[in-house]
Image: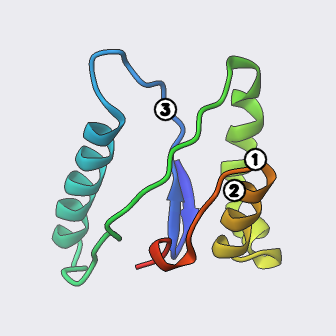
Amino acid sequence: MGGVEDHVHILFGLSRTISLAQVAEKVKTSSSKWLKTKGLPEFAWQSGYAALSVDVQGVLGVREYIRGQEAHHRRMSFQEEYRSLLMEHGIEFDERYMWD
């Protein structure tokens, strides 16, 4: 897990007995509660999330990518990177619904 001030990346194995939506809800709920105990009552997650899959051979590369978030985002914003990733993989998107 790692990130910067406007987003976080979490690498995990998804069990067949829990949905991605359930994982996202649990992460958002428990981390919000924890942050409020640390004096950040104004913290709030955005309504959406994105999930990408990776094969076993790609796990080490993703771990390194997550570790390098701070340096990486000095060169490219999260929004720029996310748009680029979607376009690279031919995923259509509408900017009106991407950021809240």
Label 3 Cα neighbours within 10 Å, binned few <14 / some 14-19 / many ≥20: few
Drawn side of residue 33 relative to residue 82, left or right: left
In which quadrant of the rendered view does residue 60 lie? top right
Residue 11 percent coordinates (x, y): 54, 38
Residue that mark 3 sits on: 12
73 versus 86 height, above or below: below
Which quadrant of the rendered structure holds the C terminus? bottom left
Does dot 1 land on a helix, a strand or a loop? loop
C-alpha separation, residue under disc 1 versus residue under disc 2: 5 Å
C-alpha separation, residue under disc 3 versus residue under disc 1: 22 Å
Asked if disc 1 and disc 2 are in contact, CB closer than 8 Å, the reply is: yes
- The residue at the point 52 percent across, 75 percent down is 5
Asked whether 32 or 22 is in front, the reply is: 22
Which amino acid does the dot numbered 1 rest on? His
Which disc is residue 89 wearing?
A: 1
C-alpha separation, residue under disc 3 versus residue under disc 2: 21 Å
In which quadrant of the rendered view does residue 45 lie? bottom left
Residue 4 percent coordinates (x, y): 57, 69
Asked if disc 3 and disc 2 are in contact, CB closer than 8 Å, the reply is: no
Residue 42 percent coordinates (x, y): 23, 84
Label 2 Cα neighbours within 10 Å, binned few <14 / some 14-19 / many ≥20: few
Label 1 Cα neighbours within 10 Å, binned few <14 / some 14-19 / many ≥20: few
Residue that mark 2 sits on: 86
43 versus 33 height, above or below: below
Which amino acid does the dot numbered 2 rest on? Leu
